[in-house]
Amino acid sequence: MSTIAKDSAVSFNYTLKDAEGNVIDQSQGEPLAYLHGHSNIIPGLEAQLEGKKVGDKLVAVVEPADAYGEYHEQAVQEIPRDNFQGVDDIQPGMQFQSQAEGQMMLVTVKDVKDDVIVVDANHPLAGKQLTFDVEVVDVRDATEEELTHGHVHGEGGVQH
C-alpha cells in the first residue's frame, strides 16, 4: 500500500475549522486531489500528511506561519474611491483584484468612507490557527504529465 511521499497524487476528504470550531470549508463529498511535495496545499497540512496511507484519518492543527501567514496590519490600506471606477455600490466584504509592484493580489473591502475605501490585502485566513479533520481516500504515483504540469489531473484535480 502506497504511503504519501513526494510526487504522490493524493486525494482526501476534509473539514476545515478555525480556532473557535467554526467550519470554514469542507470537501463536500468530492475529495480534494493534490500533488504531494509541489506546494499545492499549505505547508503545515502537507507536512502532516507525509507518510500517511489510504484510510488514515487525522486531525491536523496548523499554525498561521505554516498556513496563510501572520496577519500584517500594514496590508490594510486606504485607497482613493476614484480607483474603483465603474463600481458604484462598494460594500464591506467585497473582494477585488489589485495589482501592486507587478503582482496580482486579492483585496477585501473592510470599510467604506466618503472618499476612501479601506482594503485588506491579507489572505482571509491569515493569522488564524486552522484545524483540518482529514481522511485520506487515495494515494498513487503521479503520472509523468501530472509531474510536468505540477498538479493532479482528473477527479478532484485540475481539469484541462
Image: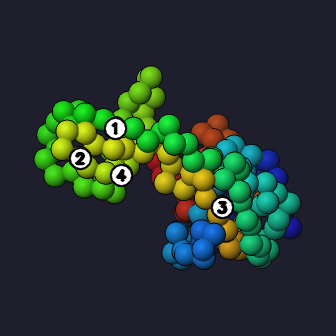
For badge 3, the amino acid type reads: Gln
Q: Secondary structure at mark 4?
A: strand
What residue type is disc 2 on?
A: Lys
Residue 3's spot in the image, x, y percent? 84, 61
Tell which of 31 and 94 is nearer to you. 94
Q: Residue at x 49, y 54 (%)?
A: 124
Q: Nearer the viewer, mark 2 or mark 3?
A: 2
Label 2 SS = loop
Q: Calculate the distance from the C-alpha at mark 2 to the C-alpha at mark 4.
A: 10 Å
Mark-to-mark CA distance, 2 and 3: 31 Å
Q: Earlier in the sequence, mark 1 or mark 2?
A: 1
Q: Which residue is mark 4?
A: 110
Residue 130 image point, x, y percent: 64, 63
Residue 114 percent location from the top left of the image:
18, 44
Query: Mark 1 highlights which residue?
Result: 78
Q: Which residue is mark 2?
A: 113
Of the numbered discs 4 and 1, the one sitting upstream in the chain is 1
Q: Residue at x 34, y 57 (%)?
A: 93
What is the crowding at mark 2: few (fewer than 14 residues within 10 Å), some, or many (at least 20)? few
Ranked by sequence position, the earlier of labels 1 and 3 is 1
Q: CA distance from mark 1 to mark 2?
A: 9 Å
* Image quarter in which the N terminus is found: bottom right
- Residue at 74% of width from left, 46% of height from top? 37
Residue contact at pointers 3 and 4, CB within 8 angstroms: no
Q: Nearer the viewer, residue 5 or 41?
A: 41
Query: Label 3 near label 2: C-beta < 8 Å?
Result: no
